[in-house]
Image: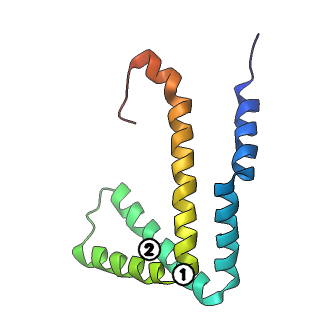
Amino acid sequence: MSINVYDIAYEMEKGIRQSTEYNELKKWFDAVNQDEAAKKMFDNFRELQMQLQQKQMAGQEITQEEIDHAQKSLQLVQQHDTIAKLMNAEQRLSMLIGEMNKIIMKPLEDLYGPQPF
């Protein structure tokens, strides 16, 4: 019997959308987006994150000044209650997806042994 793994993947996507973790994330994401000041603060933080990540991926060194700025930005958004709840919900969903990834990669691990993915 042949199994269509894409059908299973789409079922997983539906499951994620129905999960408590995703719905909590969506609730806090919507709350941040409804608060103009919180949205601006969060968007600025995300933009800074992306800039630093792109710089790092390009092999460029991140300066101490950039690190300090990123840490101050993180502290600022963590002090905003709604953004902090959004970030916590994002972390919980990310952990869930990470655990799912380990399960998905298990057949390859069985063949090749543990890999430093």
The secondary structure type at the circle numbered 2 is: helix
The answer to whether residue 21 is left or right of residue 72 is right
The amino acid type found where label 1 is placed reads Asp
Q: Marks 1 and 2: which is nearer the front?
A: 1
The answer to whether residue 69 is left or right of residue 109 is left
Image disc number at residue 13: none
Seen from this angle, which residue lies furthest top?
1
The amino acid type found where label 2 is placed reads Leu
Which residue is at the front of the view, 1 or 63? 1
Which residue is at the front of the view, 32 or 79? 79
Residue at image position (51%, 44%) is 98
For the C terminus, give its image quadrant.
top left
Residue at image position (70%, 35%) is 9
Image disc number at residue 48: 2
Q: Could you say which quadrant of the image residue 68 lies in?
A: bottom left
- The x and y percentages for residue 100 are 57, 39
Residue at image position (44%, 69%) is 49
The residue indicated by pointer 1 is: 81
- The x and y percentages for residue 37 are 59, 89
- The x and y percentages for residue 81 are 54, 81
For the N terminus, give its image quadrant.
top right
Mark 1 residue crowding within 10 angstroms, few (<14) / some (14–19) / many (20+): few
Mark 2 residue crowding within 10 angstroms, few (<14) / some (14–19) / many (20+): some
